[in-house]
Amino acid sequence: MSNTIKVIINFFIFVMVAGFIVYIIKSVNKDKTTFVETDTVNTFISYYSKVNTIELEDTIEAFAVLNKDIFVLHNDNILKYNSKGIKELSFKTKPEVRDIHLYDNKIFVLYSKMIEVYSLKGDSVFGWNACSDLSDYCAFTIVENFVFVTDASNKNICQYTTDGNFVQFINSPHDFITPSHAFDITHKNDTIYCVNPGRHLIESYTLKGRFIASFGGPGTEAGFFAGCCNPAYISFNSKGDLYTSEKGSPRICRYKNGKFQEVVLNPRLLGGGYHAYEIKNIDNTLWVANHNKIDVYRRKEN
């Protein structure tokens, strides 16, 4: 047999063996994908049931609720809806709106470099500028006549009084890592809680800015946070349980005293996508916002 024929035969044998190996690898990976999808997504059972869905006219960028009235930030506007989703009020805001809170019968609106206060009818009452020209504010919470604002640019928390007087900067002992605007903050009683998104932590502070503790950490399993900038949103219920909302593979989880308790809603039940769903706990119900609707959930009775 000539050398040319031997080379051709060996070549075909090599191609056949390589093709068989590729087929085996693809089959194994396909089986793995199917197992994960079936086991963790399709068979997931939530202990929370949807009790209401409120469809609004506009996309929700941030929202707050007062006596079942819903105040929504959308495209540099504040829109007020009733519990049936009917718009009752709309007024213009400044550009670069980031967050909204209702406190002392007033509407506090956070911008990238300032805070403005409105009446419930939409009249501007007063406001103040950020204490740094380089500030890039993300989220805020209000408690005991103090306003605590997260700043992605300066990587700190800025504390003001509710009449706009600067109090102090609060820095993390771990250093805040803030690759994006997913820098949420909330409170429970007189304790401040904020995310440290780049480190996948949730940190707590006193009203005087003293660091208390942190929990979380990087990881793909429930109880930890993966990807960039997680968790994206945090919110407490009246029982003191903390709920987290994550992006990438969106899910909502519940923690108690810093300990993971359960996955509340997984990507399939939330509706998929990559963005985090904004969450609020109001009257022992979980409000979950996405696009132009808010789904309201309540934990099922055991």
Image (cartoon, grey):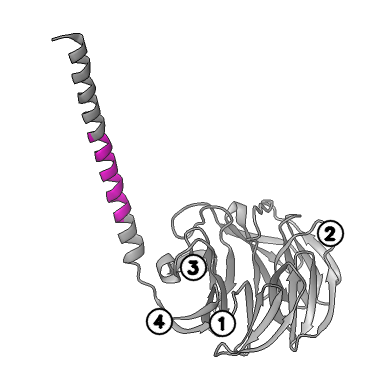
The mark lying in front, picked from 2 and 1, is: 1
Q: Does the residue at mark 3 contact the one at mark 4 (Cβ under 8 Å)?
A: no
Q: Assign the magenta stretch its main secondary structure.
A: helix
Name the image quarter holding residue 114: bottom right
- Tag 2 secondary structure: loop
Q: Position of residue 27 (x, y in %)?
A: 26, 45
- In percent of the image, x 58 and y 76: which residue is there? 280
Q: Nearer the viewer, mark 1 or mark 3?
A: 1
Up-down relation of residue 119 to residue 29 (above or below): below
Earlier residue among tags 2 and 1? 1
Q: Which residue is mark 1?
A: 56
Q: Which residue is mark 3?
A: 252
**Real-space CA distance between mark 4 and mark 2, rounded to the nearest whole angstrom:** 47 Å
Q: In the shown orientation, is residue 125 left or right of residue 34?
A: right
Q: Nearer the viewer, mark 4 or mark 2?
A: 2
- Amino acid on which disc 2 is placed: Ser
Q: Give me the C-alpha separation between circle 2 and circle 1.
A: 36 Å
Q: Quadrant of residue 281?
A: bottom right
Amino acid under disc 3: Ile
Going from the N terminus, do you reach mark 1 or mark 3 first? 1
Q: Amino acid at mark 4?
A: Lys
N-terminal label among 4 and 1: 1
| Bounds of the magenta segment | 20-35
- Say which residue label 2 marks: 132
